Image (spheres, helix red, strand yellow):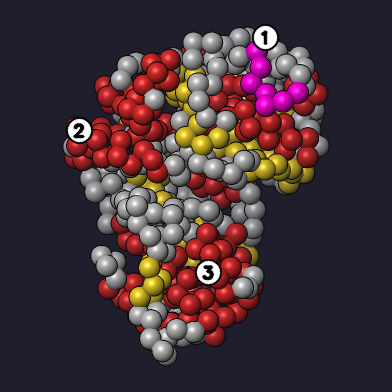
């Protein structure tokens, strides 16, 4: 049996799955936590990767590995391969004014035509402009810029400074800080706002406009290419990283999930995690000058138009805590109320919002009357508000002539019966709920097998539920009435 490993290095944690390369059968898995916050020392990701691998039983029998990770995170390196400052993550909104400046200098139409996206706070280019303006001394030291999965894959292959471990003995890297060995893939490169899915090239003028000077950027690999092989090092690494394992190109997290789900043209994935995402697999690139839809690349030589929201499962967390209930009870309460919650509408911008681009926004409740202000209505309004934000994202994707055959509803919240039932009332397209899994890490495993064998695996995702269609227009009509309030 040939085994491959897929990694999901997400905002919250690192997950590792080890699968049979031929059948896709799960052999074992492991996980470890990441620190909280919107900026993180990348060394914490490296430590978590080691812990997750150990929790998964090690890599001694694994032939290939691929890392899918949170997109956009700004990892800036000096000439010695050292980390200049903690990485700014996608959800750090202090770069919102920088995004506005880039947009003003280039223009939305030109920016979208050149990169497929319009700058918002989450993109790497915006964070580099923030660095240039807020920390000019650090910006001047930047010799290379990488994304989280780029940096981790680079480290797996033996590159980097002598010691980037948060604690413990020195981590000896025999290949040294060779910055030109950095690699990435189209899906992650397309989230930087200085690489074009249409041309397959970096726009160095936009990069330098953001940072203020040139720097080394990762070489962009194809979906089936190998970045190299793992290099066994001294110190703690010798315990967990056997030499010679093939390291695949890696991917951004959403593209990894699409790959892990086996999504194809006509499929739209709605993911309800810490953030919410709506993304489709298409055969043609998309351009949206409004900036609502990011014209990303996929991890399979296709394209991945994507809408992201900052507020998804955290909306349910907040209202559940307010009501003093757990997720199950929140769902039970919500299903006691009628669609539309008697006019109670929750606009769920608890953490500002990325789509629409309102980084300073706050959450609001509308339609509070003596009749509507009940625990069941508030529970339902929370779920409806969260899903309406995602449904608005689907509308934006469809406006770019993207066809929708079915919706794949994933993420922890998708397992709640109330979320499933209300989703069937909010979305007009058929909904399928895949069996819970680590789809981002699974996408990494697919890519690892692809890089190892030269052939993309066709592992089918199991289906857990298919809610009966029950579209209730009143829910979205009420929500839309307060969209500009």
Q: Does the CB distance between marks 2 and 3 fall below 8 Å?
A: no
Nearest the viewer among 360 and 224 is 360
At 33% from the left and 42% from the top, the residue drawn is 96
Residue 220, position in %: x, y?
45, 24
User: Left or right: 436 with respect to 72?
Assistant: right
Q: Find numbered disc 1 in the image and state the secondary structure of the residue it sits on.
A: loop
Query: How far is the residue under mark 2 from the one under mark 3?
Result: 41 Å
Is 125 above or below relative to 217? below
> What residue did someone put label 1 on?
174
Residue 72, position in %: x, y?
44, 36
Q: Residue 469: in sight, yes or no?
A: no
Image-quadrant location for residue 159:
top right
> What residue did someone put label 3 on?
319
At 76% from the left and 14% from the top, the residue drawn is 234
Is 301 above or below relative to 355? above
Residue 110, numbered circle: none
At 24% from the left and 49% from the top, the residue drawn is 290
The segment highlighted magenta reads 162-168
What type of secondary structure mainly makes up the magenta span?
loop
At 30% from the left and 35% from the top, the residue drawn is 98
Nearest the viewer among 22 and 154 is 154
Which is closer to the viewer, label 2 or label 3?
A: 3
> What residue did someone put label 2 on?
106
Residue 360, position in %: x, y?
34, 52
């Amino acid at each position: 049996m040939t085994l491959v490993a897929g990694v999901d290095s997400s905002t919250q944690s690192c997950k590792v799955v080890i699968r049979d390369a031929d059948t896709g059968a799960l052999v074992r898995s492991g996980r470890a936590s990441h620190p909280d916050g919107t900026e993180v020392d990348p060394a914490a990701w490296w430590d978590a990767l080691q812990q997750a691998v150990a929790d998964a039983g090690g890599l001694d029998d694994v032939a290939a590995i691929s890392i899918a990770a949170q997109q956009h995170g700004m990892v800036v390196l000096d000439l010695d391969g050292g980390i200049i400052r903690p990485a700014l993550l996608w959800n750090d909104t202090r770069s919102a004014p920088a995004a506005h400046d880039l947009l003003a200098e280039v223009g939305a139409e030109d920016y979208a035509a050149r990169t497929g996206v319009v700058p918002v706070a989450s993109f790497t280019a915006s964070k580099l402009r923030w660095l240039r303006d807020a920390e000019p001394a650090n910006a001047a030291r930047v010799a290379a810029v990488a994304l989280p999965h780029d940096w981790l894959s680079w480290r797996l292959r033996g590159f980097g400074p002598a010691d980037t471990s948060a604690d413990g003995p020195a981590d000896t890297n025999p290949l040294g800080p060779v910055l030109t060995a950095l690699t990435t893939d189209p899906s992650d490169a397309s989230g930087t706002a200085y690489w074009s899915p249409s041309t397959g090239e970096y726009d160095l003028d936009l990069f330098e406009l953001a940072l203020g000077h040139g720097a080394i950027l990762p070489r962009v690999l194809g979906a089936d290419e190998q970045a190299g092989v793992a290099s066994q090092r001294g110190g703690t690494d010798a315990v967990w990283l056997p030499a010679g394992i093939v390291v695949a190109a890696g991917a951004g997290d959403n593209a990894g999930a699409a790959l892990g789900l086996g999504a194809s043209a006509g499929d739209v994935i709605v993911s309800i995690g810490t953030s919410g995402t709506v993304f489709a697999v298409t055969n043609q690139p998309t351009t949206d000058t409004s900036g609502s839809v990011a014209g990303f690349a996929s991890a399979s030589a296709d394209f991945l138009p994507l809408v992201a929201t900052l507020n998804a499962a955290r909306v349910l967390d907040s209202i559940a805590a307010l009501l003093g209930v757990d997720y199950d009870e929140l769902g039970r309460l919500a299903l006691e109320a009628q669609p539309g919650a008697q006019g109670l509408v929750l606009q769920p911008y608890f953490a500002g919002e990325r789509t629409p681009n309102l980084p300073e926004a706050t959450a609001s409740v509308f339609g509070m009357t003596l009749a509507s202000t009940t625990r069941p209505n508030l529970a339902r309004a929370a779920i409806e508000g969260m899903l309406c934000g995602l449904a608005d994202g689907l509308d934006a994707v469809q406006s770019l002539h993207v066809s929708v055959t079915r919706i794949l509803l994933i993420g922890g919240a998708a397992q709640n019966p109330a979320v499933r039932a209300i989703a069937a009332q909010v979305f007009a397209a058929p909904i399928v709920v895949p069996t819970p899994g680590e789809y981002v890490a699974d996408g990494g495993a697919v890519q690892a097998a692809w890089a190892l064998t030269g052939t993309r695996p066709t592992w089918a995702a199991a289906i857990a539920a298919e809610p009966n269609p029950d579209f209730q227009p009143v829910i979205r009509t009420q929500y839309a009435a307060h969209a500009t309030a």
